[in-house]
Image (tube, rainbow, N blue to C red):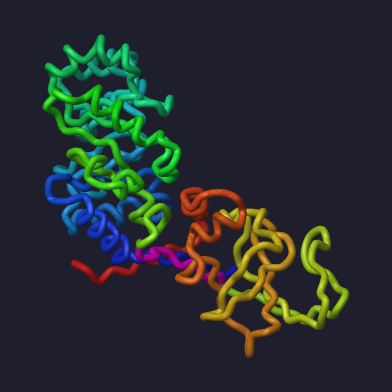
Amino acid sequence: MASSLLHIDLDAIASNWKALDAKSGPATQTAAVVKADSYGLGADRVARTLLRQGAKTFFVALAEEGAKLRQAIGDGPEIFILSGHMAGDCDMIADLDLTPVLNSPEQVKRHMDVLPEATFGIQLDTGMNRLGLEDADWRALAPSLLEKSPSLIMSHLACSDEPHTGMNERQLAEFTRMTDGTGLRRSLSATGGLLYGKDYHFDLVRPGIGLYGGRPYTDATPVVTLSLPVIQTRIVEAGETVGYGNTWQAERRSHVATVSAGYADGISRRLSNNATLWAGDTACPLIGRVSMDLITVDITDLDGTPEEMDLLNAHQGVDALADLIGTIGYEVLTSLGARYQRRYSETLG
């Protein structure tokens, strides 16, 4: 089967990071979130690109991700592990100079028992009720933890893409109350909080989705193009159907292209009869059901037969595709499958 191509513009990622860095201001360090293999785009390539632009701090979800990232970028840059110090992580944390973000009294104890001299960060729960020390635990543990000078105290906004709920203001106030006077480096905001302005910036911001062209950073430069090769075309007469379940029936004599990709490649079955592919600047409807390896497209109105068609491009980004199926751009990006040939472009040094 022909190979589908996922083109990743590293220059665009660099441009997005530099633009967000400018928004955070000179007093605030701009890190980069490269968890989940940089949202599916390749943490090794992305992190090396951002290092050349001046990024010095990276965030991943798991110690295993941190280990791979350390091998890719070498010694020096700080790599935070957002899941904290999990059982079995000791050797990776110590040997590869990773910084766990401790989230619970149990993680604090584990870290102090096995790596009492190793650096660490602290996450506080300011209302999201997901990860982080709650207020009572923080008050009990703060005296001993602060003596060890954590590298970072952080929290996470629950509604950074929903500015009118009042939750962001409540979390900002809680984070400020819990951390004022510590004298330590603080971080509250990922992409969304960074865009709210300096009150949310503190000492470090950690953009993620904004680097990769997704909301809420609506000024982001598009990063990905997903091009799917046309395997076969056929004429479908009026009244005939296409695909599993006969869910699409031709109302006219139609020219139908079968292209190489399907739900095994992260193209949601919910896009069946509900999406657009592009031949250059011309939109063509996806027809019939998305199957495991194939989708079908009505190309009747094209002048010719394209060799490939784009599902993601400058006309239709990850958020536009996500809106069609009631999800978010994060899920679209991280679902892009391993069968795609990934091709990188980069001209910036």
Q: Position of residue 271 (x, y in %)?
A: 65, 58
Q: Position of residue 29 (x, y in %)?
A: 17, 45
Magenta stretch: includes residue 225:
yes
User: Is residue 296 visible to us here?
Assistant: yes
Judging depth in this view, the residue of 230 and 173 nearest the camera is: 173
Q: From this view, report whether residue 38 is shown above or below residue 222.
A: above
* Image-based side of 236 in relation to 316, left or right: right
User: Is residue 85 visible to us here?
Assistant: no
Q: Position of residue 270 (x, y in %)?
A: 66, 54
Q: From this view, report whether residue 140 is shown above or below residue 336.
A: above
Magenta stretch: includes residue 251:
no
Judging depth in this view, the residue of 88 and 177 nearest the camera is: 177
Give the farthest residue toward the top. Answer: 140
Residue beneath the point at 56% across and 54% down: 266
Residue beneath the point at 31% across and 13% down: 137
Q: What range is drawn magenta here?
A: 220-228
Quarter of the image for the N terminus: give it. Answer: bottom right
Q: Where is residue 284 in the image (x, y as percent from the top left)?
A: 63, 75
Residue beneath the point at 24% across and 36% down: 187
Judging depth in this view, the residue of 157 and 59 nearest the camera is: 157
Where on the picture, by quarter, is residue 283? bottom right
Where on the picture, by quarter, is residue 346? bottom left
Quarter of the image for the C terminus: give it. Answer: bottom left
* Image-based side of 83 in relation to 284, left or right: left
